[in-house]
Image (cartoon, rainbow, N blue to C red):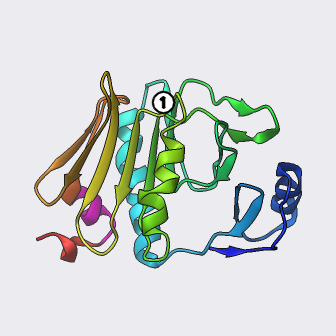
């Protein structure tokens, strides 16, 4: 991520920039970072997740959102755009911004070479501070692999799933077969 400037910005500065910018930005610790565009594989995996979740969420109180959803992690101040998010119930708005929501139940990030470490590390840790978040899913784009963190009574558990396995998202009553995610994205060649 490339920083817009080398001084601390306020959240208001960030919101003002987002209103006029044609590029999405992330806000963290007083810095504003331009978010890079994704590869065709990245985009196809995001679309596949929405397509596969949609029918399973029909007639439920949960809804899937694309990467246009603005999300704010109130405990840390992070403002970002997850690749796919599921919110159950009504979206709760950030008191400082009517355009940012604060209550995702599930977040999916498709891993990119430039942001993989951040998505699996610091960003995931910040997301997990959100009381509403029950599941964080990281989807690889170079192989058929999905990492999932689920909140349980004893804290967060982690699993890595691959070909022939399925991801059970109890928090939203959905199941996603790893192979199906990659086939729907047109990436069947990644399935072992």
Say which quadrant the N terminus sits in.
bottom right
Give the position of the C terminus as an image quadrant. Answer: bottom left
Please provide the residue range marked out in magenta: 180-186
Observer-nearest of 124 and 108: 124
Left or right, 31 with respect to 170, comes to: right
Q: Is residue 152 visible?
A: yes
Residue that appears at 31% across and 21% down:
153
- Residue 40 falls in image quadrant: bottom left
Residue 20: image location, x then y, percent: 87, 64
The residue at the point 57 percent across, 56 percent down is 67
Asked if the stretch drawn in magenta spans residue 140, the answer is no
Q: Magenta region's main secondary structure?
A: helix
Q: Which residue is mark 1?
A: 62
Residue in front for this viewpoint, 102 or 176:
102
- Percent of width and height locating residue 29: 72, 55
Q: Position of residue 105 (x, y in %)?
A: 47, 33
Neighbor class of circle 1 (other Cα within 10 Å; few <14, some 14-19, many 20+) is many
Q: Find residue 139 and report its image quarter.
A: bottom left
Secondary structure beneath label 1: strand
Would residue 46 appear left or right of 189 to someone viewing this image?
A: right
In the rendered structure, the answer to whether residue 171 lies left or right of residue 61 reads: left
Q: Residue at x 64, y 69 (%)?
A: 35
Is residue 181 on the magenta stretch? yes
Q: Is residue 47 visible?
A: no
The image quarter in which residue 53 lies: top left
Above or below for 61 versus 31: above
């Amino acid at each position: 991520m490339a920083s817009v400037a080398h001084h601390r910005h306020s959240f208001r500065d960030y919101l003002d920039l987002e209103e006029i910018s044609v590029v999405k930005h992330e806000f963290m610790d007083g810095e504003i970072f331009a978010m890079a565009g994704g590869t065709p594989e990245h985009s196809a995996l995001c679309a596949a997740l929405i397509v596969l979740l949609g029918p399973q969420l029909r007639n439920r109180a949960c809804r899937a959102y694309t990467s246009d959803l603005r999300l704010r992690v109130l405990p840390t101040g992070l403002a970002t755009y997850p690749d796919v998010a599921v919110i159950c119930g009504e979206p709760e708005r950030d008191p400082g911004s009517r355009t940012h929501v604060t209550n995702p139940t599930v977040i999916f990030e498709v891993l990119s070479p430039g942001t993989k470490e951040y998505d699996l590390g610091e960003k995931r840790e910040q997301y997990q501070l959100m009381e509403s978040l029950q599941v964080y899913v990281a989807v690889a784009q170079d192989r058929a692999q999905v990492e999932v963190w689920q909140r349980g009574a004893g804290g967060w558990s982690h699993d890595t799933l691959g070909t022939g396995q399925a991801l059970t998202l109890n928090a939203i009553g959905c199941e996603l077969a790893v192979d199906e995610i990659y086939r729907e994205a047109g990436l069947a060649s990644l399935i072992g």
